[in-house]
Image (tube, helix red, strand yellow):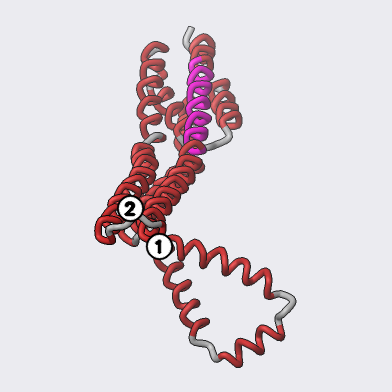
Amino acid sequence: MKKLFAILAVVGVFTFGMTQAAMAQDSTATAAPEQTEQVAAADEATTPAVVEEGGMHKELKTKFIEGDAGFMSLVAIALVLGLAFCIERIIYLSLAEVDVKKLMAKVEDALEKGDVEGAKTICRNTRGPVASICYQGLMRIDEGLDVVERSVVSYGGVQAGYLEKGCSWITLFIAMAPSLGFLGTVIGMVMAFDQIQMAGDISPTVVAGGMKVALITTIFGLIVALILQTFYNYILSKIEAITSQMEDSSITLLDLIMKYNLKYKK
């Protein structure tokens, strides 16, 4: 459900932005010529920067439309859905990060006093996979160190699966975006040859339309793949950092439990 809400939110924002941009363009196009001349005369000093921004936005929109609405819409959908999954993973991983050193110091202080329940409470009230692993180990502290180690290892694998959840969808959209672009390239080439066949003549004017569609769809597909790949690598780096913290905290927990057993279970 969280992923669904995230996807719907991103799609809604994307649709709202496109609608507002279209409304802004319509209002600008229907403005009176004399009002336009007055505004241009009054803001002559600031006009170049505004025109440059509007020109870039307008150019991207123009190229998007020229790339054939069917294929370009599929590429845009892949970008929106891929970004939705990326944002969901980044939020989840950010919430999973805690101050591990501070957490383990609190657990160590509680075990030094023989307060196992207090150590459990500390882990239970702390978010993130590291605290969950420590809690599972403390739950079996009376069953022996071997049982604690097996429990920590098993539950660590479960938490690692939670961290990587949804990453397969991101890789799917990374692969789909350039594939859709290449598909548009092939379709554009077919359109170009159809136009050549209908015209009965090979000329730049006849071939230009299909070739333009082919190149634009490929460019946008590659751009989408690069954007999603950047976010995906960032997500992988966060997963690796949290996994490393989980492994270090597991070893530290086993050492603390061993000291507890030697001190209170002679």
Chief SS of the magenta region: helix
Amino acid type of the residue that numbered disc 2 sits on in the rendered structure: Gly
Residue corresponding to mark 2: 188
SS for dot 1? helix
The boundaries of the magenta stretch are 234-254
SS for dot 2? helix
Q: Earlier in the sequence, mark 1 or mark 2?
A: 1
Residue farthest right in this picture: 45
Residue farthest top in this picture: 266
- At x 41%, y 19%, the residue is 141
Q: What crowding class fits label 1: few (fewer than 14 Cα within 10 Å), some (14-19), or many (20 or more)?
A: some
Residue 240 part of the magenta-drawn span:
yes
Q: What crowding class fits label 2: few (fewer than 14 Cα within 10 Å), some (14-19), or many (20 or more)?
A: many
Residue 37 part of the magenta-drawn span:
no
Q: Mark 1 or mark 2, which is nearer to you?
A: 2
Amino acid type of the residue that numbered disc 1 sits on in the rendered structure: Glu
Whether residue 5 can be seen here = no
Q: Is residue 218 left or right of residue 48?
A: left
**Rendering quarter of residue 154:** top left
Q: Is residue 83 left or right of residue 99?
A: left
Q: Residue 63, image x and y in percent?
A: 45, 61
Q: Residue 118, image x and y in percent?
A: 50, 31
Q: Nearer the viewer, residue 63 or 1?
A: 63
Whether residue 153 can be seen here = yes
Residue corresponding to mark 1: 66
